[in-house]
Amino acid sequence: MLKINVKTDCGHSPKRMLLRDFNIAFGKGDAKFIVGQVTDDIIWDVKGERTIEGKDSFSEAINEMKEKEVAEITIEKVITHGKEGAVNGIMKMKDGKQYAFADFYEFKNTTSTAIKTMTSYVTVI
């Protein structure tokens, strides 16, 4: 069972709550939810690894990640302003590995919660 820790208050901000839920969905392997939150022309830049363009490629990458089992996710901060947002935290895997992450998001526009771009930084700790 996935243990979830959220150290930031995401209340009353739809974009902050979405980014919290989006990251929790990564831990749960909920590909359907994750893919449902992005635009058709999503660009995901995983620094030092690869850049994924388009919803179909994004969906493939997310479904590949489902095989990695997460034991615990800690969300340290969720920040949004206008059409941008950021989340950082730690994922502990069932195999004992731990990853610190920082993700930066751009929404489709200032009123939308659809994610247009993601830039991810991931470090083994």
Image (tube, helix red, strand yellow):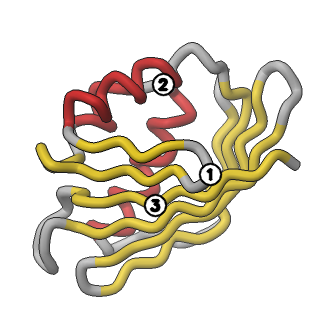
Q: Is there CB contact under 8 Å for labels 3 and 1?
A: no
Q: Residue at point 76% right, 52% down?
A: 123
Marks 3 and 2, how far apart in space?
A: 19 Å
Image coordinates for residue 65, horizontal then vertical, percent:
52, 24
Marks 3 and 1, how far apart in space?
A: 11 Å
Along the polypeptide, which appears first: circle 3 or circle 1? 1
Q: What residue did someone put label 3 on?
A: 119
Q: What residue did someone put label 1 on?
A: 48
* Left or right placement of residue 48 versus residue 9 in this view: right
Along the polypeptide, which appears first: circle 3 or circle 2? 2
Could you say whether the residue bearing mark 2 is in a helix, strand or loop?
loop
Of the 4 image quadrants, the one containing the N terminus is top right
Could you say whether the residue bearing mark 3 is in a helix, strand or loop?
strand
Inspect the image, locate mark 1, and give the three-letter code of the amino acid beneath it.
Gly
Give the vertical position of 84 relative to 114 (above or below). below
Considering every residue shown, the one lying at the far bottom of the view is: 81
Inspect the image, locate mark 3, and give the three-letter code of the amino acid beneath it.
Thr
Inspect the image, locate mark 2, and give the three-letter code of the amino acid beneath it.
Gly
Rendering quarter of residue 15: bottom left
Along the polypeptide, which appears first: circle 2 or circle 1? 2
Q: What residue did someone put label 2 on?
A: 29
